[in-house]
Image (tube, helix red, strand yellow):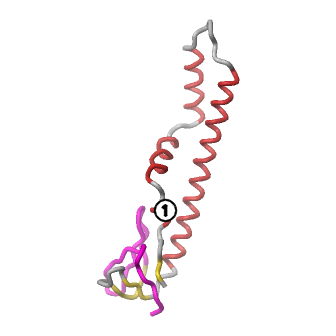
Amino acid sequence: MPVSAINPAAAQTSSASSSTTSLKSLNYDAFLQLLVTEMKNQDPTEPTDTSEYMAQLASFASVEQEIQTNSRLDKILSSLAMTQATGAIGKTVTSADGSTSGVVSSVKFYTDSVKAILQDGSELTLGPGVTVSQS
């Protein structure tokens, strides 16, 4: 049976990952500092409407909640990837081009990939095109 995506965390879109990373550094304290700075520097003859501040706070809270949700989903996907990868132990894996094949003795988890360690000591990155079959 082919393993199509053993590491779903690597399938994240790069644009979402980079924007999420930059937003993670922004927190409520930073937002409040920006808000206070904005209030200090506003034109006293034309103050900003308080409803605009509330809209900004609501938008920020929404973005932070989305970041937390994405973080939880990443953890779930990582857990699923680990479960799938450990299920390959004791089974025969074959690379997409057929050049590497062997029985999996263990698996190693890296940030961006999962590698099967074969009984002969060689490694095979688990991913699209890799075939997993009963030994």
Q: Position of residue 118 (x, y in %)?
A: 36, 83
> Going by the image, does 68 lie left or right of 118?
right
State the residue in front, 135 or 130: 130
Q: Residue at x 47, y 78 (%)?
A: 3
As drawn, 92 above or below 12: below
At horizontal 60% and vertical 56% (from top left) the residue drawn is 72
Residue that extends furthest to the top in the rendered view of this protein: 45
Q: Is residue 22 magenta?
A: no
**Element type at mark 1:** helix
**Position in image of residue 20 (x %, y %):** 50, 46
Q: 10 Å neighbourhood of mark 1: few (<14), some, or many (≥20)?
A: many
| Residue 116 % position (x, y) | 40, 78
Residue 81 position, x and y percent, is 51, 70
- 23 horizontally vs 124: left or right: right
Instruction: Based on the picture, tell me whether residue 109 belongs to the magenta stretch.
Output: yes
11 to the left or right of 51: left
Q: Is residue 128 left or right of residue 81?
A: left
The quarter of the picture where residue 98 lies is bottom left
Residue most extreme to the left: 99
Q: Which residue is mark 1?
A: 9
Q: Which residues are magenta?
A: 107-135
- In this rendering, the answer to whether 76 lies above or below 93 is above
- Label 1 amino acid? Ala
Q: Name the residue: 46% across, 55% down.
A: 13
Looking at the rendering, in which quadrant would you find the C terminus?
A: bottom left
The answer to whether residue 101 is above or below residue 55 is below
